[in-house]
Amino acid sequence: MYVERLALIIASCCILSYLLAMKYSAKRFKTWPLRKLVLFVSGIVIGLQAVAGPIAMHAHHSFVYHMIGHLLLGMLGPLLLILSQPVTLLLRALSQSGARSVSRVFRSRYARFLIHPITAAVLNIGGLWLLYTTHLFHLMHESALVSMLVHLHVFAAGYLFTLAMLYTDPVPYRKSYLYRVIVFVFALAGHGILSKYLYANPPMGIAPADARQGAMLMYYGGDLIDLTIIVILCWQWYQAAAPKTSLSAAKAAE
């Protein structure tokens, strides 16, 4: 219950902060799109399901519900939050000196290391391999502290990975689209192989039938969310590569 209350408080503070940032941003810039607020709130609410509510409650006894929580907290929630561009909004809402301070943090070596596509992929997919192929999965159901830390890592790693693939917020030292696509393919393979491994090798204390259903959900559900990221990444690549100006039909005929 302590973890659930803490998660609800953090989620409420995040939504309130986003609303305040929208208010201050509107004083100097044009109104922040309402659809981005909807994306942000949806991402928070969806991610919250993994630690508070019916899905979190059933996840203690069902691997299928645990996997639903993983998909919501580590994949779909971060994707919606990334699309709401919270860092861009923060930079608009802060004063000039405050925005410079945030920019310095993003340009730091530590931030560059974390947002690097390979680092983010290792933290994201590597963390899942560590969770499901060691005693960590058992421990997270025995200790509230371990459970909270695991959920925090799953969300943070999912957020970093999605940000490193899509760059929806200002990110210095960006890697090329081809570079990100190659990293994404390897990450996709790592996620898919792990789901097949779990299908044949259930985690400690999980019944084989429950593990197989959860593994299938991880495989197909993960692919569906990854497909969304691929479509957005390809659209960004297409827009970046498309000519900035197009010839009119009359000029083209000359």
Image (cartoon, rainbow, N blue to C red):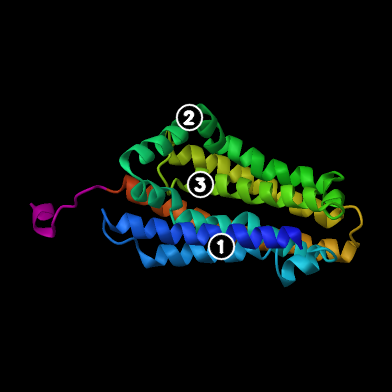
Viewer can see residue 59: yes
Secondary element type, mark 1: helix
Magenta segment, which residues? Answer: 243-254
Q: Residue at x 85, y 54 (%)?
A: 200
Q: Residue 108 carries which label?
A: 2
Q: Is residue 72 magenta?
A: no
Q: Dot 3: within a 10 Å radius of its alpha carbon, few (fewer than 14), some, or many (20 or more) residues? A: many
Residue 221 falls in image quadrant? bottom right
Tell me if mark 1 has few (under 14), some (14-19) or many (20+) residues whose alpha carbon lies within 10 angstroms of its own.
some
Say what secondary structure mark 3 lies in.
helix
* 3D distance between C-alphas at marks 1 and 3: 22 Å
Residue position marked by numbered label 3 in the rendering: 163
In the image, is 207 to the left or to the right of 217?
right
- Describe residue 90's horizontal placement relative to residue 200 as left or right: left
Task: Identify the residue at horizontal 71%, vertical 43% (top origin).
Answer: 127
Residue 43 in the image: state x and y as whole percent: 55, 62
Q: What element carries label 2?
A: loop
Could you say which disc has been placed on residue 155 in the image? none
Q: Please give the name of the residue rendered at 76% of the width and 44% of the height, measured from the top-left corner.
A: 129
Kind of residue at disc 3: Leu
Residue 12 tag number:
1
Q: Pick the quarter of the image with the N terminus.
A: bottom right
Which tag is nearer the camera, tag 1 or tag 3?
1
Residue at the location (73% across, 51% down)? 148
Nearer to the camera, 213 or 107: 107
Looking at marks 3 and 2 on the same chain, the residue that comes earlier in the sequence is marked by: 2
Q: In this view, does 43 lie above or below 188?
A: below
- Whether the residues at callouts 3 and 2 have beta carbons within 8 Å, the answer is no
